[in-house]
Amino acid sequence: MGVCRLLFQYNTSELSIHYYNENASDSLNNCGYALYDLNDDGFPELILAQKNDTKVIEIYTVYDNQLVNLCCSQERNVYFLCENNVISSAGSSGASTGGTAYFAYSGGNELTNLVTLSYEFNENGEKTFYKNQEQIAQNEAEKILNSYNEITLNTTAISNIPNSNN
């Protein structure tokens, strides 16, 4: 059973409307979907995203005949698809801390963390960087950040999905 059919079976046509709550009446026109094979197994994952943008809303796969949500963007944590099927997650826990994590999907029901970069500002406004919780120099952090390039997703509007009763 394909991912799109499972989405209809699980009645998730209202997925991620909360992500577009500023313009909820038009949210399905601003959302798109794309199919990408993230783990090269011949079965694509379903990516819900902002229409023709780099921001990923949610990623789904089928594992053990069950629909599995691999990630879900939130108000202070947004996912992106990068080159080579790497998934990044950029977030903030407040004005003085934040970071970006990079993941791969190799199958199963979860993503695998490749590396996590974080930062924090001290009381003097100086920024400290960390790689997997170990302090690193700013140029090393920038080198890692620059090694992952986000891609623009070519999506189809969710409002164009045919009715599941057809």
Image: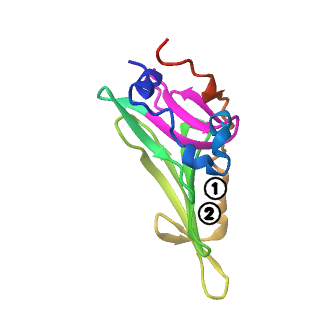
Q: Residue at x 43, y 20 (%)?
A: 2
Circles 2 and 1 in contact, beta carbons < 8 Å: yes
Question: Which residue carries the number 1 mark?
Answer: 145
Q: In which quarter of the image is residue 98?
A: bottom right
What amino acid is labelled 1 in the image?
A: Leu
Q: Distance between the residues labelled 2 and 1?
A: 6 Å
User: Residue 38 colored magenta?
Assistant: yes
Residue 139 location in percent, x, y? Answer: 67, 66
Q: What is the quadrant of the N terminus in the image?
A: top left
Q: Mark 2 packing: few (<14 Cα in 10 Å), some, or many (20+)? A: some
Residue 45 is situated, as x and y percent measured from the top left of the image, at 48, 29
Please tell me in which quadrant of the rendered image residue 65 appears: top left
x 43%, y 41%: residue? 70
| Residue in the foreground of this view, choosing between 7 and 115 | 7
In this image, 141 relative to 70: left or right? right
Question: Which residue is identified by label 2?
Answer: 141
The span picked out in magenta is 31-60
Q: Is mark 2 on a helix, strand or loop?
A: helix
Helix, strand or loop for disc 1 = helix
